[in-house]
Amino acid sequence: MDNQVQTTVDVVKTIDPKLTSNLSDDTIQALISNAGLIALGDHIPKIVEIDGEQVPIRDMATRYMTLHLIATSAGKASQGITEEKVDVLEKHYTDTSSLDWLDKSPWGQAYLRLFQEYGDYGVTKYGVVQH
């Protein structure tokens, strides 16, 4: 692949500027590093070929996981807030207790889709022990 795609702080900020507006570049970089390790640990391949094109699947997963980590730790999604009114303070919450962790943000759902398609999702691992 000639033009190697990479997850950078600027790319993450561009994808969701509102979500990342209150974070420092160092914090986003640390989250990118962690998200990359999660994608690697989930055995998401670096590149897959689709219709003759090389697609950087692990990089996509890293971006999605970075944004999911931000959304679930600092965003309103982590608090279950669906609506907020400023005048005569009013908040509406959603019950997220029954949701899996990756289902708690649209970014986590995007990551889960890649994980189910390309990662170790549902793969049974076993070893043979000789007696």
Image: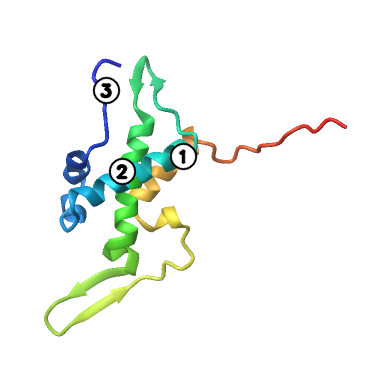
Identify residue for label 1.
115
Spatial distance from mark 1 to mark 3, Cα to Cα? 21 Å
> What is the secondary structure assignment of the residue under circle 3?
loop
Q: Residue 3, how many percent across, how many down?
A: 23, 19
Quarter holding the N terminus?
Answer: top left
Q: Residue at x 26, y 15 (%)?
A: 2
Spatial distance from mark 2 to mark 1, Cα to Cα? 17 Å
Side (left or right) of 16 relative to 40: left
Residue type, numbered disc 3: Gln
Q: Residue at x 48, y 35 (%)?
A: 117
Identify residue for label 3.
4
> What is the secondary structure assignment of the residue under circle 2?
helix
Extreme residue toward the left, this view: 87
Residue type, numbered disc 1: Phe
Identify residue for label 2.
32
Q: How many marks?
A: 3
Residue type, numbered disc 2: Ile
Task: Please name whichever residue, 61 or 86, is drawn nearer the observer in this view of the structure.
Answer: 61
Q: Residue at x 34, y 53 (%)?
A: 69
Q: Is residue 54 above or below residue 33?
A: above
Spatial distance from mark 3 to mark 2, Cα to Cα? 17 Å
Extreme residue toward the right, this view: 131
Q: Residue 22, how many percent across, how many down?
A: 17, 58
